[in-house]
C-alpha cells in the first residue's frame, strides 16, 4: 500500500504530495500520539487505579462477577489495573491496529493473557453473545476517551453506543462522571487571537489608523478548539469577571445522549469589564462519591494543590462571538452549546425584571449553530497569527524599518501571506505598492478578504494584489516598473518549522529579473539561532516510562522509539515554547545566516561547531529559531526574546513555534569549571529548503 502525505515544499511554498511507504502513517501516528505523556501522568494513573479498585469492590460486594469493558485500551493499562484489582474478565477494545498488537504483547508480558481479551475493533463494531466478541454484557465500563475539550475524541457517541449494546443497566463506570467548568474573563492578550485591533501608523502627513472591516468585528470565528497550557498564562494577562461556574456534567454510568444540546447557567459578574473570553476545563470523578477527583483546573482555581503537568489534557479558550461590556452584579446567562464533538459559548444579558419564567423566551436567542467564520479573516489568519499581527511592538519595528528604506518614488512588492506590510508601506509614502497573494491552498482565495479590508480603509485603488506565484510574475503586473523595495515579514501559512519561511528567499530569487539594480530587500538577511535547553516538562512526551503503576509498558517505549527513529535523520518538531518552560544550558548561538540581498546559492549552507554547557542541568535537546534583520539595527526574533542570566530562564516569542530537536540520550552537566561541550553539524540544503542536524554529546 502507498500513502501520499501532503507537505509544503519550502522552496516553492506550495503543497506537494509525497509518496511514503505503508509504515509511514503508523509511525507518524505513534510518534505524534500522546501515549508517553499519558503514561507519565501519575495523577491520572493513580486515580484511575483507585477508581477501578473501588468499582471492582462494589460489584464484588453485590456478589456479582466483575466483567470489565475497557474502550480504547491503548497499552492495556486500565484493563491490567482492573485484572489486578480482582476483575474476573476484561474485554479490552482498541481500534488502532498497532496499538492493539502492542496491548496483546504488554498484557502477555505482564501475565494477564487469561484475564484480558484484546479486541482490535472500534467499539461500535463489537458484538455480544455466545459467538460474539464478548460473551456477555459488562458490568464495569472503563474508558479514557477524553481530550482537552472532553468530547472532541468522540466520547459521547461511544458511551451512547456502549450503554445501548455493550454494558448492563446499572453498570459501574470509571470515571463515574465528568464536569465541565467555565469562567468569564477579559483579556487583551487572548482577545488579540480572535480579532484584529486597529493599527496606528505615524505617517508624514499625520496619523493613519488601519481598521478591520465591520464583518470581522462580529464574526464568530472558527469552531476548532483553542487548547493551551493555561498554567503558562500569567495572571497579569487576564482579569476574571466571574466565579468559576459548572456548565454541565455527564454521568457515565447511565445512558448517555450525544445529540446536540445546550446548557445555560445564570451568573453575576464579580467585576465590571469587557466579557471576551470563556476559559474552560473539566474534571472527572472516578467514583460516585466524588472522593477520587482528577482535575484540569488551572493554578488560580486550586492554588494549594500540586499541579500535574500534562499535555494530553490542557485547558480551553473560547471566544465569545462579540465583546460584551458587563457590570458587576448584573444578571447574565452563559450558554454552552455542544454537538457530538465540540463546544462553543454564548453570553446573554437577562432582561429587566426577568426571572426563570423568561427561560423559554431565551431559548430562541441561543445560538445553537456552531461558529462559522463569515469574514474570511479567520480562514486566512489562525489564532497565533492574529496575535502576531496585533503585536504592536513587532509592528513598530516593521514601521521603523520601512520608514528607513522607503522613498516617495519607491516601487514596493510584498511577499508574505496575509501581511499588513503593503498597507504600512502605502501609509509610509511608497509610490506604488503591490503584494503577491497566490492562493496557496485550493480551498481558499484571500482576494475577497483583501477587497473588504481595502474598502474599509479607502485603499481600493492604492494597493494591487497580484494573484500569481513569484516565478510567474510579469512586467505587466508591475506596470513595467522595476521593484525598488522588496519586503516580507516573512510569513507563509504553509510553514511548519521556523526556517520554512525562508521561502521568502526562494521567492526573491524567482523575481530577481524584476528587481532594480539598487533594490532594497527587507529583511536584508535572516539568521538561524540555536541553544541547548533543559525542559521543565516537555521531555515527558518522548521519554520512556518503563514501569507504569507496577505494569511493564516497555513494549510501548520501544514502539515510540522505533517510530521516532523511522526517518533516517531525526527531525526537529515545532512547539510553541511560551507554553513549555525551559532553561538554557548554553548561550544562544547564531549558527547560519541567509543573505536576502543575493539569490539562493546553488550549494548547501552548512556549519559545524560546539557549544559549551554553562549551567548545571539535563540537556534534553536543542531549540532553533530564526531572526530577521529588517534594517540597519532593527531585528525581530521568532524565538528567544529574553534570557534571565542567573538561572537561564527563557522568554519566547508568544506567537511563533520554535523548532525542538530532542536528543536521543540526555546528558547531565555538572561541573561548571570544565564545561561539557556539545558538537553539532547543521546543514541547510538549498535544493529542498530543509535543515538537517546532528548533535554529539
Ligand atoms: N486506555 C489507555 C489509552 C487511552 S488513549 C490509557 O488510559 O492509557 C485512547 C485510545 O482509545 C486510543 O488508543 C484510541 O485509538 C482508542 N479509541 C478511541 N475511541 C475508540 C473506540 N470507540 N473504540 C475503540 N478504540 C477507541
Image (cartoon, rainbow, N blue to C red):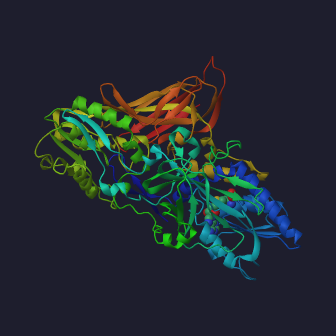
Q: Nearer the viewer, residue 682 or 250?
A: 250
The answer to whether 118 is drawn above or below residue 392 in the figure is: below
Indicate left or right for 157 with 474 as reference.
Answer: right
Q: Nearer the viewer, residue 378 or 648?
A: 378
Percent position of residue 672, x then y: 63, 19
**Residue found at the very far front of the displayed protein:** 353
Residue 558 in sight in this render: no
Indicate left or right for 154 with 492 as reference.
Answer: right
Q: Say how many tags the image has.
A: 0
Q: In what quadrant of the picture does the C terminus appear?
A: top right
**Residue found at the very far bottom of the displayed protein:** 130
**Residue found at the very far left of the displayed protein:** 480
Q: Nearer the viewer, residue 334 or 643?
A: 334
> Residue placed at 76% from the left, 78% from the top?
136
Q: Nearer the viewer, residue 627 or 335?
A: 335
User: In terms of image quadrants, where is residue 258?
Assistant: bottom right
The answer to whether 373 is drawn above or below residue 166 in the figure is: above
User: In terms of image quadrants, where is residue 141?
Assistant: bottom right
Percent position of residue 229, x then y: 56, 46
Determine the quadrant in which ligand 1 lies.
Answer: bottom right
**Residue found at the very far top of the displayed protein:** 673
The answer to whether 692 is drawn above or below residue 457 in the figure is: above
Percent position of residue 58, x then y: 84, 67
Residue 279 in sight in this render: yes
Percent position of residue 78, x then y: 74, 60
Amino acid at each position: 500500500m502507498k500513502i501520499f502525505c501532503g507537505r509544503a515544499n519550502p522552496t516553492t511554498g506550495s503543497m506537494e504530495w509525497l509518496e511514503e511507504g505503508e509504515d509511514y502513517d503508523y509511525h507518524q501516528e505513534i510518534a505524534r500520539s500522546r501515549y508517553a505523556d499519558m503514561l507519565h501522568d501519575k495523577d491520572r494513573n493513580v486515580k484511575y487505579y483507585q477508581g477501578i479498585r473501588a468499582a471492582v469492590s462494589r460489584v464484588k460486594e453485590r456478589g456479582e462477577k466483575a466483567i470489565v469493558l475497557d474502550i480504547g485500551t491503548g497499552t492495556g493499562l486500565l484493563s491490567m489495573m482492573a485484572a489486578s484489582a480482582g476483575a474476573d474478565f476484561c474485554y479490552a477494545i482498541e481500534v488502532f491496529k498497532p496499538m492493539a498488537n502492542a496491548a496483546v504483547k504488554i498484557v502477555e508480558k505482564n501475565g494477564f493473557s487469561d484475564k484480558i481479551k484484546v479486541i482490535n475493533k472500534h467499539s461500535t463494531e463489537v458484538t455480544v453473545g455466545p459467538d460474539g466478541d464478548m460473551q456477555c454484557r459488562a458490568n464495569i465500563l472503563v474508558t479514557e476517551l477524553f481530550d482537552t475539550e472532553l468530547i472532541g475524541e468522540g466520547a459521547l457517541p461511544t458511551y451512547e453506543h456502549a450503554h445501548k449494546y455493550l454494558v448492563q443497566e446499572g453498570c459501574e463506570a470509571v470515571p463515574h462522571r465528568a464536569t465541565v467548568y467555565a469562567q468569564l474573563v477579559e483579556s487583551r492578550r487572548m482577545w488579540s487571537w480572535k480579532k484584529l485591533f486597529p493599527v496606528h501608523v505615524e505617517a508624514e502627513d499625520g496619523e493613519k489608523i488601519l481598521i478591520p472591516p465591520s464583518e470581522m468585528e462580529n464574526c464568530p470565528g472558527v469552531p476548532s478548539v483553542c487548547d493551551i497550557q493555561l498554567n503558562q498564562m500569567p495572571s497579569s494577562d487576564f482579569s476574571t469577571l466571574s466565579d468559576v461556574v459548572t456548565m454541565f456534567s455527564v454521568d457515565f454510568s447511565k445512558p448517555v445522549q450525544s445529540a446536540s444540546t445546550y446548557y445555560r447557567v445564570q451568573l453575576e459578574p464579580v467585576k465590571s469589564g469587557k466579557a471576551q473570553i470563556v476559559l474552560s476545563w473539566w474534571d472527572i470523578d472516578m467514583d460516585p462519591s466524588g472522593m477520587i477527583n482528577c482535575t484540569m483546573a488551572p493554578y488560580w482555581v486550586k492554588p494549594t494543590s500540586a499541579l500535574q503537568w500534562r499535555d494530553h489534557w490542557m485547558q480551553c479558550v473560547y471566544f465569545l462571538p462579540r465583546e460584551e461590556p458587563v457590570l458587576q452584579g448584573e444578571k447574565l446567562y452563559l450558554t454552552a452549546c455542544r454537538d457530538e464533538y465540540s463546544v462553543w459559548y454564548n453570553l446573554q444579558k437577562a432582561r429587566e425584571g426577568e426571572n426563570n419564567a423568561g427561560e423559554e423566551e431565551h431559548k430562541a436567542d441561543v445560538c445553537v449553530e456552531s461558529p462559522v467564520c463569515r469574514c474570511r479573516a479567520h480562514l486566512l489568519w489562525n489564532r497565533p497569527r492574529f496575535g502576531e499581527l496585533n503585536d504592536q511592538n513587532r509592528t513598530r519595528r516593521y514601521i521603523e524599518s520601512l520608514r528607513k528604506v522607503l522613498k516617495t518614488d519607491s516601487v514596493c512588492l510584498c511577499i508574505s501571506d496575509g501581511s499588513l506590510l503593503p498597507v504600512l508601506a502605502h501609509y509610509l509614502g511608497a509610490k506604488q505598492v503591490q503584494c503577491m497573494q497566490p492562493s496557496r491552498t485550493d480551498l481558499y482565495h484571500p482576494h475577497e478578504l483583501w477587497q473588504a479590508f481595502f474598502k474599509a480603509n479607502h485603499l481600493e485603488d492604492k494597493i494591487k494584489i497580484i494573484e500569481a506565484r513569484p516565478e510567474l510574475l510579469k512586467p505587466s503586473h508591475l506596470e513595467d516598473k522595476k521593484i525598488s523595495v522588496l519586503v516580507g515579514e516573512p510569513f507563509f501559512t504553509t510553514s511548519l518549522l521556523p526556517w520554512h519561511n525562508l521561502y521568502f528567499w526562494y521567492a526573491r530569487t524567482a523575481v530577481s529579473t524584476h528587481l532594480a539594480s539598487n533594490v532594497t530587500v527587507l529583511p536584508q538577511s535572516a539568521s538561524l539561532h540555536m541553544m541547548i535547553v533543559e525542559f521543565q516538562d516537555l521531555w515527558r512526551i518522548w521519554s520512556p516510562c518503563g514501569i507504569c503503576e507496577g505494569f511493564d509498558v516497555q513494549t510501548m517505549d520501544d514502539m515510540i522509539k522505533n517510530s521516532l527513529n523511522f526517518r533516517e535523520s531525526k527531525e526537529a518538531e515545532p512547539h510553541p515554547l511560551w507554553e513549555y518552560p525551559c532553561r538554557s544550558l548554553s548561550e544562544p548561538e547564531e549558527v547560519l545566516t541567509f543573505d536576502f540581498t543575493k539569490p539562493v546559492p546553488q550549494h548547501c549552507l552548512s556549519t559545524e561547531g560546539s557549544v559549551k554547557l554553562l549551567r548545571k542541568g539535563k540537556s534534553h535537546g536543542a531549540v532553533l529559531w530564526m531572526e530577521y534583520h529588517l534594517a540597519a539595527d532593527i531585528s525581530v526574533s521568532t524565538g528567544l526574546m529574553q534570557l534571565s542570566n542567573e538561572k537561564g530562564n527563557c522568554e519566547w516569542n508568544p506567537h511563533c513555534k520554535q523548532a525542538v530537536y530532542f536528543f536521543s540520550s540526555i546528558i547531565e552537566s555538572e561541573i561548571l569549571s570544565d564545561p561539557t561541550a556539545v558538537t553539532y553539524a547543521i546543514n541547510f540544503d538549498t535544493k529542498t529548503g530543509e535543515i538537517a542536524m546532528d548533535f554529539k554529546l
